[in-house]
Amino acid sequence: MELGLQRMKALYLFLLISAITCSCHCWSIGDCVFVSGDIYFNISYKAKSSDTANPEKASVAKVSIPSDGITIGGACEDVEKGQAANLELKWKGFDFLILFVKETGNDHWYAQKVRLSYNESELLDAVNPTSVIVKTNNEEKLFLTRLTHFYQCNSSDTHPLYRFESEKVTTENLVNMTTSNLVVKPYKSLKKPEQCTMDEVTVKPTKKPTTKPHPHTDPKPTPYPWGVFFCPGDLFFKAVQIKPIQMAIRIICEARHARLVMHACQEGNQLFPQHATIIVLCGVVDGSAVRLMMSLDRKIRGDSACEHDGENELKQVTEVTKASFVLGLFNAGILLGKIPLSPAEGVVVGALFMIALLLNNILLGRHDPFIPIQGAFWKVVCSKHQKVE
């Protein structure tokens, strides 16, 4: 059951992010070619200099693939027509092409050609700007991956591109292409990721000699089931009935809740840097995962008609989801540099916030402290709506 909830949680988060995110660095052709990640080019060129004795100077321009004003082209693989899978991105003054082929024997695939065409007039203070074409070396097999997997590399990697003229690649390295958080999937049939060499752990820790556990014992026993079911006289069960111990356990759970939301926000920021909406959504989904997944599961199976609105997180948002939303906003402010706190300090503040909500429910008996704020919000909205009418 727990594994099923985790899978549904991952699916829900993927669909949610895919539906809402429109500004991510990802490009696709139909359902076959897909590339996402951060790609930029360091272009070497000659620029004008203010020095009269030396009017030209060597300069380097950093060019990124823009989110707007870009034309996406390419084609899926067509064996009958001899068409290889390719992706072409065009924006003002630039034309970027990746051509994918399968290795002889169909054991691996790779990018046979990575080409960048650009006009130096788009570069700052370029001297005698001309059109330039750079490509990868003909012998380099970029993104070489097994045919059953797609390429994935979170680490930063740099690939040299050489000037192409007179129908051949020269040794003049004009451009360095840098990639990070890269995913390359040129064929629809690829389902599993293959990590690049830089993401893999190269140094294996030395194994310490350990005693072989008894075949009928668990090498990593968890104390809680043993404490509940085998504690003499049910002492463990009776202990957790004591109010102070219950309070301590609930405080620990609220602190863990704050840590989970921060961890989810950090993952969202790592996958989609500087996207506040995605960071907040990741925190909300992780903070109220069980409730959201149960409601979504009932919706899929058609059981939602048999439940009350208060039991459906999709119809009536509870205090847990609202608190997760507040924590998500707070964590997004920290990760985006708007709030001068470290993530560890943010977890502490978030835990204090959750504990304050817990004490509010216990001492004041208020189940949802966000209701007054929610009521005031809808009062303002409704009053404006009436004035318009």
Image (cartoon, grey):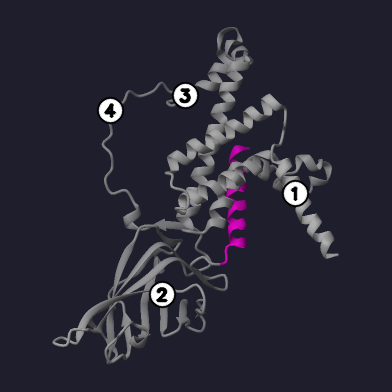
In the image, residue 85 above or below residue 332: below
For the residue pair 329 and 29, the one nearer the viewer reads as 329
Asked if marks 1 and 2 touch (Cβ < 8 Å), the reply is no
Tag 1 near tag 3, CB within 8 Å: no
Question: Could you tell me which residue is drawn at 28 percent across and 34 percent down?
Answer: 207
Residue name at image x 61 percent, y 20 percent? 246
**Which residue bears the numbered disc 4?**
209
User: Mark 4 or mark 2: which comes first in sequence?
Assistant: 2
Tell me residue 280's x, y (percent): 57, 51
Q: Locate residue 198: give its quadrant.
A: bottom left
Look at mark 3 in the image and give the residue it sits on: 221
Whether residue 15 is in magenta: the answer is: yes
* Circle 3 crowding by C-alpha within 10 Å: few under 14, some 14–19, many from 20: few
The quadrant in which the C terminus is found is bottom right
Number of callouts in the render?
A: 4
Q: Secondary structure at mark 4?
A: loop
Measured Cα–Cα span from mark 4 to mark 2: 47 Å
Q: Is residue 240 left or right of residue 210?
A: right
Which label's residue is closer to the chain start, 1 or 4?
4
Q: Which residues are magenta?
A: 1-22
Residue at image mark 2:
101
> As displayed, is residue 51 above or below residue 325?
below
Residue 110 location (% of width, % of height):
38, 70
- Amino acid type of the residue that numbered disc 4 sits on in the rendered structure: Pro
Q: Cα distance, mark 1 to mark 3?
A: 37 Å
Please report the residue visible at 17 percent of the width from the left and 88 percent of the height from the top: 52
Mark closest to the chain's N terminus, 2 or 3: 2
| Amino acid marked by disc 1 | Lys
* Above/below status of 113 relative to 201: below
* Residue extending furthest toward the right: 389
Residue 27 highlighted magenta (yes or no): no
Marking on residue 299 = 1
